Amino acid sequence: MVIVPSSAVETVGPGGTLGASAPRQDIRTGRTFRMLSHLFVGLLLVFSLLLCDCVASAQTGIFPAGSRHLYIHCEGRRHGPAVILEAGLFRDSTDWRLVQPEVAHFTQVCSYDREGLGKSVVDTSAKPEDECIDVAVDDLRNLLKSAHVAPPYILVGHSGGGPRVRRYTRNYPDEVAGLVFVDSAHEEQIWRFQAIDPRSVQGPQTNPERAICGGGLPYPGQRLTWHTDKPLIVLEHGIPLTFDPPLDAHTAEFNAAVDNMAKDLASRSTKGQLRIAKKSGHDIMLDEPQVVAQAIRDIWDQVKANTR
């Protein structure tokens, strides 16, 4: 679009010859110029937004997720992949309250509550402990679609959220660009802990069918087959776990098992690495949120560099 300034336009005077325009024509021309100028600025703004690789944050609130309705909270302006935060077993989005604002400085980041937890209590009869892992994965995928948070994603899973993140990556590999495991549970931990002391595993996980539904591998010797070529950082707590009697007699063995499983998870990616959060217990995102935010930023940087 070319805009010609009104001062460069000659108009025809009353006698039919070129000359000064009448006052009303001057006013009309000035108004036209201002209108065109505003239009031009508006178009520039639209084009700049289209050319930018960032989009406004999705809404925060309750959104449909298949047959359910779940709460999602997003912050930040998107640049490259969005970061999705997955809380641990029976935990909700508030676990990420110290990490999410830091990640929002460089891209869009969303946390959410699974059915029956936090603000996702639309169905008061929901029982999160009965939800199978594939259902939980599809809930998240449908929620992200409803909230207009498109892939690719960097998925971040804490504790029991780790297996759900891995299952999402297995089921929908093209939607995942990178991964961060925050003191993640391991699919093999049921039988590994039971081998140390059968009393170490209690509740529904002692039922093999229930354990499999939740993504676990309950039978002795069962091995996780999941592998990936995506960038991965595994964060492990640096403060040793402690146990009450009678399990305290096996404290060293349990800690060694946990360490070995963290190393195993890091080895599952051709681009994996293990980092120790030296000042943290199991809840690294609360003890050392900066360590988690930095790991997410490092994966985000890798993904961005690989897509240039």
Image (cartoon, rainbow, N blue to C red):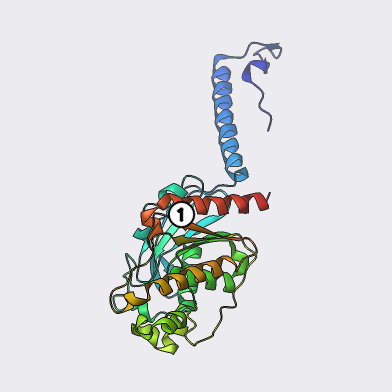
* Between 229 and 77, the one nearer to me in the picture: 229
Q: Is residue 210 above or below residue 158?
A: below
Q: Is residue 166 above or below residue 5?
A: below
Q: Which residue sits at x=39%, y=60%?
A: 239
- Expressed as whole percent of the image width and height from the top left, the position of residue 256 reads 46, 71
Task: Using the rendered image of the protein, determine whether residue 193 is visible from the camera's viewpoint.
Answer: yes
Q: Which residue sits at x=67%, y=23%?
A: 4
**Amino acid type of the residue tagged 1 in the rendering:** Val
Res 271 → quadrant = bottom right
* Between 290 and 39, the one nearer to me in the picture: 290
Q: Which residue sits at x=59%, y=30%?
A: 36
User: Badge 1, how many Cα within 10 Å: few under 14, some, many 20+?
Assistant: many
Q: Which residue sits at x=41%, y=79%?
A: 131
Res 59 → quadrant = bottom left
- Expressed as whole percent of the image width and height from the top left, the position of residue 185 reads 45, 71
Q: Is residue 1 above or below residue 303?
A: above
Query: Where is mark 1, residue-wise?
Result: 292
